[in-house]
Amino acid sequence: MKRLGYVLVAALPLVLCLLLGGCGDNPRATALLTRADSLMAGRPDSALLILDSLLTDSDRLSTHFVMQCRLRRLNAINKLDTVFTTAHVVQARILAAHFDNHGTSNEQMLAYYLLGRTFADAGEAPQAINAYNEAANRADTTATDCDYKTLCRVYTQMANVFYQQGLYREDLNNLDQAVDFGYLASDTLAALLAYGQKMGAYRLMLKPDSMLIVCDTVCNKLCNAGYPVVAAGMLNYPIRYLLDIGKIALAHQYLEIYEKESGYFDKNHEIASGREIYYYTKGYYYLKICQYDSAEYFFRKELATGKDFNNQNAGSRGLALLFQQTHKPDSAAKYALYSYEMNDSVYAQKATEEVAKTKAMYDYTRYEHEAQQSKLQAVLAQLRFVITAVIAVLILTFAAILAYRYRRVQKKRKEEKLHYQRLLETYRRTEQELLELRAHQEQFSRMAVERQEALAHQQHTTQELNRLRQSEQMLTELISQKEQELERLDAELAQYRRKDELMAVASSDEESLLRVLPFYQSLLRTTDQGQSLTDSDWKPIHKFFKERLPQFHQFMSDNRHALTDYEYKMCLLVRLYLKPKNISNALGLDASYVTRVRRSMVKKLFGVDANSKEADMLVRQIDRIKAEKTAD
C-alpha cells in the first residue's frame, strides 16, 4: 500500500509535465521566418525558398513553428498566382484547424483566407464564402498591428465569388469593405482596383450611368496616384455604352487611350490572349461612324481570333448588324442565324453553370451538415476527455491522501518505538557510568595529593612550553610572509613571461602561432561548419585574451560601454584573424552586415573612417600600441 501511494503521487506531476511540455525554437530559424515575412509582398519566390529550407529541418522545430512556416509557404504559393487543387484544400484545412486555437489574430485571418482561396479555385463557392467570412471575423481591427492589407484581400476575393455567382449587390457591398480596408492599409492601388471592379457589377445590373461614374472616378484617382497604365486598362468597359448613347467622340478618346497606354497590345498591335472582345468593340465603333470596311475587318478578326462562344457570338452579331446596315440581307441573315446558334450555346453554357451553382449549394448544405456532425463529435470527445481527466485527478488525489495518512501513522508508530528503545539504552548507559564514577572516585582522591606535590615543578615546565610556542608562532608568521613574497615575485615573473610571449607573437606570424592552440582549432572548426558560437565556446576565448593579451583585454574592457554586444564580439574575432565568413557564421549574421559593423566599430573606438581591411589592421595593433605606451 505504501509503494502504491508513492507511485500515484509521482504520476501526477509526470502527467502535468506531459500536458504542459513544449519546446523552443532555434533563434536562427525564427530570424529566417521573419526574413521570409519581409520578402513575402515583393519577392514571394525568394520567401518560398527560405520557407522550404526551414521545413527540410522541421524535426528539430516545434509543431506551432512548423505550422507557421507552412502557413507562410501556402501564402507565398498564392501570391505566385498558383491555381489551387484538392491537395491544397487539404493543406488549408489542416492549417485552419491548427490556427483556430493558436497563433495571432492576423495568422488566424490568413489561415481562413487561404482556405477560402483554395475552396474558390476548387469550385466550392459557398464554402469559400464561409471561409472568407470566418477570416474577416478573426481580424482584430482594434489592434495596432492589424493586417488591413490581408483584410482588404479577403473582401475583394469574397466579392469575386459573389460576382461569379450572380449576386451583384453582395458583390458591391464587399467591394465597399475592401476599399475601406485598402485605404486603412495605405494600399491605394488595392483600394482603387477594388473600387474599379464595381463597373462589372453595374454593367450586368444594367446601370450604365453608375458604371460611367465609377470609371471616371477610378481612372482619375489612378492617374493622380501614378498608375496611368492601370487606369487605361479599365476604359474598355464603358466604350460600347458610349457608342450606344451616341457619345462617339468620347468613345474614340477612350479607345485611343486604351490602345496606347493599357499595355495589352504587342508591337504588331495584336491584343493579349483572352481580351479578343476588344475587336468587336473596335468594329462596333467603325460601324457607328459608317466606316464599313474597317468594321468588317475587326468583326471578322473577332471571329478568327476569339474561339469561345462569347467571341463567336459577338463577331457574328457585328457582321449581321453591318450587312443589315449596308443592305445585304442574305449575308445579314447568314450571320444572324450563326449569332442565334452562338446565343443558344451561350445560354446552354450558362444553364450548365447554373446547374453547377445549384450543385455547389447542395454540396455546401451537405458539407455543412457533416461539419456540424464533426463539430458535435469533437465536443463530445472533448467532454469525455475532460470527465475522464477529472475522475483520474480525483482518484489520484484520494490515493495520495490515503498514502499520506498511512505514511504519517506508520512514521508516528516508528518514532514512538525508537523513543522507547533510546530511553532504555540511556538508562543502562547512565547506570554503568555511575558505577564507573564511584570506582574512580577513590583513585582521584589519592591522585589529588600527588598532584599537589608536583604542582611547583609543573609551573616551571609550563612557562618554558609557552616560550617555545611563542617562538613557533613567530616562525610560522615569517614563513607565511616569505610564501606571500614568493607568490608576488612569481606573479611578476609570469607577467614578464607573458610580455615576452606577446612580443614574440607580435614579431612573428601570430596567426600561425594561434593555430596550434586547441581552443583556436575548435573555433575554426565550428565556424567553418557554419555554426554559431555558444557561451561555452566564448569562455576559452575570453580566458585567452585575459591571460595572453592583457593589454588588448584591458583596452576592450575600458571601451565596452561604447560598443554593442555584436561589435564587442566581432572585435575579439577580428583580433584572432578570423575571416569575415567565419565571423558571420560565429555571430549568426549576414556577411554584408559584418562588413558594415566592422567599419562602425572602428569609428567608435578610434574616431576614424576606414575600410574593412584598415579596420582589421587597427584592431590587431591595439595591444601593441597599448604595450608601447605602458613601456614609455
Image: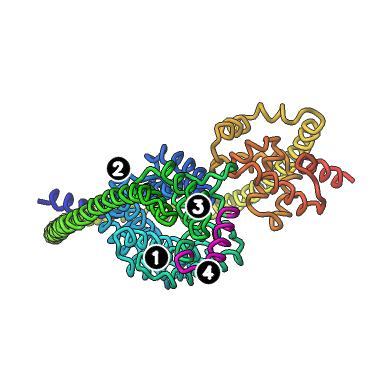
Of 1 and 463, nearer the camera is: 1
Decide which of tag 2 and tag 1 comes sooner along the chain.
2
Residue highlighted by disc 1: 203
Residue highlighted by disc 2: 87
Decide which of tag 4 and tag 1 comes sooner along the chain.
1
Q: Are discs 4 and 1 less than 8 Å apart at CB?
A: no
Decide which of tag 3 and tag 1 comes sooner along the chain.
1
Identity of the amino acid at label 4?
Answer: Asp
Residue 591 is drawn in which quadrant?
top right
Residue highlighted by disc 3: 292
Identify which residue is drawn at 82% across, 51% down. 608
Decide which of tag 3 and tag 2 comes sooner along the chain.
2
CA gap, disc 2 and disc 4: 43 Å
Mark 3 lies on a secondary structure that is: helix
Q: Are discs 2 and 1 less than 8 Å apart at CB?
A: no
CA gap, disc 3 and disc 1: 27 Å
